[in-house]
Structure formats: structure tokens, C-alpha cells
Image: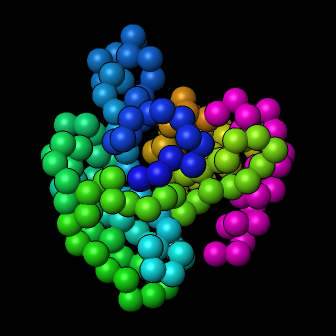
């Protein structure tokens, strides 16, 4: 999947934490469901990692990280369907919010909700995406007002 901010983070995901506190955080993870732009119409399409059905997240232990072809993609607006796509075949995140700095983006709606709560100063303790706060970019925090407006507009238009 294309990374909107252009940071070099590897092809398959993001590292969690610094890896010094607990071995669990030395693994990379991504949600099993990723909201992407439909390659056909550009609207919201849902990419589901079928190797981790029933789980919220897919860790780098899951087969989909090494071998391709585990994503089922279904558009919510048009008839686009695709089976057995690899992670690298996914287009780009559906949720991309322009602000005064780097583009803010989210894996899916739950992740976007967490970012909104975090940037608006609410507690995200206990939120299933809490650990992704490690990846909240400096720009997003610095110019939080511009992103919060963008997220609100985006959520009200979908
Ligand atoms: Zn579509």
C-alpha cells in the first residue's frame, strides 16, 4: 500500500514502540481490515486480511506478511471485488486528511476515530487502537486544529 507521507517504513507495516519495554512491541502490526481507495471508482473499499479473520490485528507472524494473496477487497460504492490481493497490491488509504503539515492518514475508521480523540485531547485509554499513538506524527500534533477540522469534514461527508 502506498504510504501518504512518504516515510520509509518498509513495505508491510509499522513497528510498534521502541522495542525496549516488552518483546511484544518488537513486532509490527496492522489492522486486519484496511480501508482503501477503490481502484475502480475511488470511493471507500474494504480490504480484509483473510488469514486473520476474526481478529482485529494482523501481526508480522501472520502468513499474509510473507506471502501475498490474502486480501479480499470489496468496494462499498461500486461492483469492484478482488480476491487474493497482496498487501503491496492495495491502493492507498481511504482516510487521508490534509492539514498544515504532513498528510494525516488512518488505516481505517476506528483508527481515524482514535486519532481524532487523541488530537482533541480526549483520553484514548482502552481504545483498541491506543498503541498506534506512537505513530502520531509531530506535524499532526503541532497543527492539530487544522487536522481536527479536516477529520470532522471527512466524517460528516461519508
Ligand atoms: Zn468502487
Q: Furthest residue to the bottom?
A: 79
Quarter of the picture containing the C terminus is bottom right
- Residue ID at (70%, 66%): 154
In terms of depth relative to the viewer, which is nearer, 120 or 147? 147
Q: Residue at x 83, y 49 (%)?
A: 146
Q: Is residue 133 above or below residue 2?
A: above
- Image position of 82 (left or right of 131): left
**Residue 34 visible here:** yes
Residue 70 highlighted magenta (yes or no): no
Q: Position of residue 77 (x, y in %)?
A: 49, 85
The residue sitting at 54% across, 63% down in the picture is 94
The kind of secondary structure the magenta stretch mainly shows is helix
Frontmost residue, 60 versus 124: 60
> Which residue, as the protein is rendered here, is positioned at the far top?
20
On the image, the x and y values in percent for residue 145 come to: 84, 45
Considering only vertical position in the picture, is 65 above or below 37?
above
Q: Quadrant of residue 73?
A: bottom left
Region of the chain picked out in magenta, as a range: 137-158
59 sits to left or right of 9? left
Report whether 89 appears left or right of 113.
left
User: Compared to 60, does 157 lie above or below?
Assistant: below
Image position, residue 113 (x, y; %):
60, 54
Q: Residue at x 59, y 42 (%)?
A: 5
In x, y percent, where is residue 19? 38, 16
Amino acid at each position: 500500500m502506498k504510504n501518504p507521507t512518504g516515510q520509509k517504513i518498509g513495505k508491510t507495516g509499522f513497528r510498534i514502540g521502541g522495542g525496549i519495554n516488552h518483546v511484544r512491541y518488537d513486532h509490527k502490526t496492522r489492522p486486519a481490515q484496511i480501508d482503501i481507495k477503490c481502484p475502480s471508482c475511488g470511493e471507500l473499499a474494504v480490504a480484509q486480511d483473510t488469514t486473520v479473520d476474526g481478529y482485529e490485528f494482523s501481526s508480522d507472524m501472520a502468513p499474509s506478511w510473507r506471502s501475498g494473496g490474502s486480501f479480499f477487497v470489496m468496494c462499498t460504492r461500486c461492483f469492484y471485488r478482488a480476491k487474493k490481493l497482496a498487501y503491496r497490491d492495495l491502493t492507498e488509504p481511504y482516510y487521508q486528511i490534509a492539514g498544515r503539515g504532513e498528510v494525516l492518514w488512518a488505516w481505517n475508521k476506528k483508527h481515524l476515530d482514535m486519532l481524532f480523540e487523541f488530537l482533541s485531547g480526549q483520553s484514548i485509554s482502552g481504545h483498541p487502537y491506543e498503541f498506534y499513538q506512537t505513530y502520531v506524527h509531530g506535524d499532526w500534533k503541532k497543527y492539530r486544529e487544522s487536522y481536527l477540522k479536516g477529520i470532522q469534514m471527512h466524517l460528516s461527508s461519508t
